[in-house]
Image (spheres, rainbow, N blue to C red):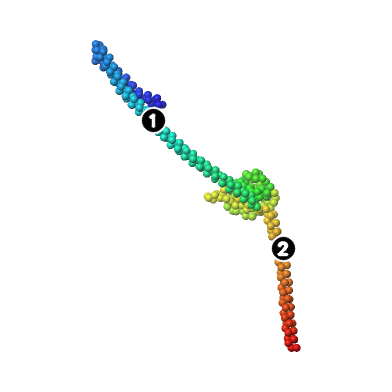
Amino acid sequence: MKGSNLNIRVLPYTVFIAFILMVFELIKIAVLEEAQVWLSFWLTVGFVTLVSFISLSVLKKAVDDYYNDLNRMEINAKLSAEAANEQLVAANQELQASTEELKATTEELEMQKEELALVINSIPDGIVRTDPKGAITLANQELLIQTGMTRQELIGRDIRIAFWEEDRPQFMAAFQKVLEGVPAKELSFHSCLGNHILVDMYALKDNTGRVQSTLGVTREFTKTTKVIEALDDSKKELGKKIAEMEILLTVTLDREKRNMELKNQVEALNRELAKSKGNI
């Protein structure tokens, strides 16, 4: 590429010199006679020397300009490369900072995810989340206990798998209403193990009001029954104790009343006795 540019610059001068020499020879042949051969020789030498000097000077300037242009191009290219390298270093530093920030954010999200999983698995009620089509995307430990299934067996499966087959049509009707914006509260179903459970389910929507997923809470009704029975037993026991306390209070009050009456009688007798002694 450099050689081609130099040849383009030199070629016009070469053609011009050839043209001048040819014209000079034609003029010399036409003007000088054969007897003036020695003059022709020196004229040729002088003219060629002059033309060569001028041509070399012009050619030197052209070559100097050419290499000066090359130097400027190389300097500009070097400056551009240095500027690009500085931009690349800055971009690399920015990318490294972004990578570290992303790493820190990812670690924080992982910690929050672990904490959230710990909290969800610690809830005594079953927690289940589905997509709008009913595929399970999240299940906590209590739900696994209620269904007797592993997380791998539940995740990605239709939520109907968690319920007794006879209850599935009724549940799906309620699920469709949840998608339409009607929450399900304390609906009675049976788990796939046959245990009686109560289900609450809600639709989770984005900012535009579009349903993104559903969240369900399941409670074993047998546990609730046991709690109610325990409360009833506590109430009966408390009632017995209250009755006993009332009897004891009645007895105590009667005893206090009798004591007061005896005390009054003793005081009256003492007064009568004092009067009797005074009369004697």
* Amino acid type assigned to the residue bearing label 2 in the image: Glu
The one nearer the camera, 34 or 214, is: 34
Circle 1: element type: helix
Q: Reading the chain from its start, which is encountered first: label 2 or label 1?
A: 1
Quarter location, residue 44: top left
Left or right of residue 30: residue 162:
right
Residue identified by numbered label 2: 237
The one nearer the camera, 207 or 274, is: 274
Q: From what the image shows, is residue 59 above or below residue 75? A: above
Q: Residues within 10 Å of mark 1 (few under 14, many from 20)?
A: few
State the image coordinates of residue 67 (x, y, percent, origin top left): 37, 28
Residue identified by numbered label 1: 71
Instruction: Tell us which disc is closer to us: 2 or 1.
Output: 1
Q: From what the image shows, is residue 279 above or below residue 41? A: below
Residue appearing at x 40%, y 32% in the figure: 75
Residue appearing at x 60%, y 47% in the figure: 114
